Image (spheres, rainbow, N blue to C red):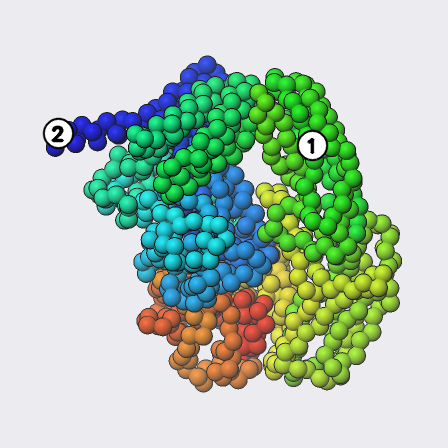
Amino acid sequence: MLRRKLLLSLMAVILLLPLVFTESVKTMAVKNGNHDVDLWKVVTPLTTTTSFLNTGAHPDDERSHLLAYLSLGKGVRTGSLIANRGEGGQNEIGSELGNGLGIIRSEELIEASDVTNVDLIMLSEDISDPIYDFGFSKSTEETLHEWGEEIAYERLIRKIREYRPEIVFPSFLDVDSQHGHHRAINVLTERAFEDAADPTVFPEHLEEGLTPWQIKKLYFPAQSNSNATVSIEVGNEIDDVYGKTYAQLGEDSRYLHKSQGMGREVPVAPLYVHLDLVKSVHPIPDKEETIFDSLDFSFTEVAERLERSDNQIKGVLKNVQSALDAVVKSYPSREEVLVNAHGAIGEVKKAIVKVEKSNISKELKKDILFKLNVKQKQLVEVSKIASSLNIDVTVDNSTLVRGATTPVELNVTNDGKVTLNNVELSLLIPEGWTVRGEVEKITLKPNESVTKTFEVTVNDDEKFYHPYEDAIILANVQYEVKKESASFTVTPKNTVAVLPDVAVALNPVQIAINQLDIPEEIEVEMTLTNYVDGPSVATPLLEVPSGWEVSVSQDSVHFEEQGQTETVIFTVNPNNIAPETFEVLGKVLVDNKEFSTTVQTINYDHIRTQYYLYNAKSAGISFELTIPDGIKVGYIESGFDQIADYLINIGMDITKLSNEEIASGDLAQYDSIALGIRAYRREGLPQLNSRLLDYVNNGGHLVVQYHTPNDSYHGENHPPYPLTIGTPSIRWRVTDQNAQVEIKDPEHPLFNHPNSLNESDWENWVQERALYFPSEWDERYETFISMADPGEEPFESGILMAEYGEGTYLYTNLVWYRQIQGQVAGGYRIFTNLISYPLFKD
């Protein structure tokens, strides 16, 4: 027993040696007044062969503090696997929702992962992918049904077999207080511990060249040290190189999730991440010293596992580790790191040849070869930074059309101190494209520059830009140091996209027709954008339902330059024909080629420019909607919904109110005033609350839509009587959009005037019924409806209304904006009744 304890202690010391070595190198560099963040970020991974994968459902699910500790602090090859792109959420920085929001959140995730030096892995592959954020879910079963369990699980197993992580950790538990998407990823991740190693699970992977992979350790989140196998301190120690704690570095990453309002200031103070080891290929201990216990941390430990007969392999692996250690020890000298990195590349290549020829077991051979190939790629990244090459890739025209030609300039300067030999600059382009330009090998001495110009021509039938695919033009840079080569790619400064010759955008994008008042004319704006590099002529066309008539303000549009936009007006006469659902399609002819694509440019400072391409159409519905004669409504926008525009388009008299108008305008002129969702986040509005209450007290009708517990809406003093928004929010929502709705008093004016409501008005809702139900409210509020998700107790606070002075105050947390903007007839009809109440309350 004593001998076994001594052996275990010795193994623990051996495992800690690489960590101690890394810290000593880093500390020495900082003591000498030198630190190079970019270089250290790529050098640290050379210290270990182990790997970690964090699984989550949405962008922002990554456990950023832990990832920063593992990747930036310990050099672990760290991956973040995310299922969907957050398309079903809300947008705190703009108006994009759905796929547009998914593109934003995907780009934010890329930027966030770059901060923590984490490999990003996505299960969602496409626009409107099956693994879509369909909104909040309360169950694993619903989530996997919506995604397609087989699709989601096959992709997860594939990614695990490709990445081959030794440690896997889902961000959330499978408990009823969690989002169903989070729970589903936990369930699939746990199942994958065995299945990723089973060749009978998705055997088609083996036919494609993938091999089964046995995860070594599976951790779940733990609540505290008492129920954790290991706890990792991330908040109380400032990293010498980065000048911040790992929690602070993690928050730097989270700040980039701006569309979700993420990121917070964290002080230097004790903060732990607690992990519970739930599955392992080794016996599970009560406690661990580190997350790396029982794993090979470096090639030295890998070599120790080999049999005596494999001494030759042991030797080359130890040589590789020595070469890697030499690179790390050279930090922070870029020239020494560069030279030693290329020496290490040579050692890795030798080791690969020796291991391939060895007689060790197939599984062990694949594992070692995989780790060697990873190290070779990591050494190239080291070379890229240590070479101090300054590389600019400039595409003269980054918005291309089919058949277009553009110059591409590569400017490379050697800002380092080492001569680079056999430097070769080239372009990587899609198949079918052509490139002209001389490719030659040169020598690039310190402080020397070289510029290469190429001419690229797009294929005539090239597909249009896709935001989730790799860049279509890349520069490839290759050079030698110590006769060992390194090559890597560089992305152009600007997003390069192949777009239609002329893009078509229709306004409105959705058309709602009131069957009780079918308009004689409907105006449809068509905005055309020229992407041809020079003049072009476009003929605009509009396809409408049978029986409708169309006239256009001009038959053709003449463009002089790229990027020019022109708007034409189509006047549509429905001829008293209003199908319940219909489409209006926009098209344009350019040089006898037809285009019908909208190009939505997504441009924010914290992410690269992106393009969302979709069919140019306006979706339409028609239904009966009674709008009271002469009703006048004020709307206080929040920036989170477009309800006012949709109501204006269907014929209501809506005035959008500014803070100045609220503060000093005549509010009494409005029969009702409605607040957009989360409106109290609008700057200055909370300070104007007394004006809104005065409006109600003097006979007005105020309709307040939902707020979250974290918004600036205070239930104690903003409404006339107290109400409390329920927490945690997961328990105070109805996510089943088809949940049964019970009307307490069907004869109440809210459900009869001006529209007589029935069950059909609660049908065909989208995404969910309601969010952020009030959990408590003053007895002076009247309740009107109840609803519940399957198997749960009903909520009664979806519509609360109270008399206050001469007027009425109505609070509603039903998701009206998703219904109205989603073209749900019942959403229009019920909301119209809510804002029309003062005209019928007597």
Residue 548, can we see it? yes
Residue at the extreme left of the image, as rendered: 1
Residue at the extreme top of the image, as rendered: 32
User: Badge 2 is on which residue?
Assistant: 2
Front residue of this view, candidates 275 and 685? 275
Residue 342's spot in the image, x, y percent? 54, 24
For the residues labelled 2 and 1, the Cα–Cα distance comes to 62 Å
Front residue of this view, candidates 640 and 510? 510
Q: Residue at x 26, y 29 (%)?
A: 11
* Residues packed near mark 2 inside 10 Å, few (<14), some (14 to 19) or many (20 plus): few
For the image, the number of numbered tags is 2
Residue 762's spot in the image, x, y percent? 49, 78
Q: Is residue 555 left or right of residue 726?
A: right
Which quadrant would residue 773 be assigned to in this image? bottom left
User: Badge 1 is on which residue?
Assistant: 425
Q: Is residue 39 left or right of residue 480?
A: left
Front residue of this view, candidates 797 and 330? 330
Front residue of this view, candidates 194 and 519? 194
Residue 320's spot in the image, x, y percent? 43, 26
Q: Residue at x 54, y 50 (%)?
A: 106
* Residues packed near mark 1 inside 10 Å, few (<14), some (14 to 19) or many (20 plus): many
SS for callout 1 = strand
Which quadrant would residue 412 be assigned to in this image? top right
Q: Is residue 763 left or right of residue 651?
A: left
Name the amino acid type tagged 1.
Leu
Residue 462's spot in the image, x, y percent? 72, 54
Q: Quadrant of the N terminus?
A: top left
Q: Residue at x 32, y 25 (%)?
A: 17
Picture layout, residue 576 above or below residue 642: below
Picture layout, residue 546 above or below residue 229: below
Name the amino acid type tagged 2.
Leu
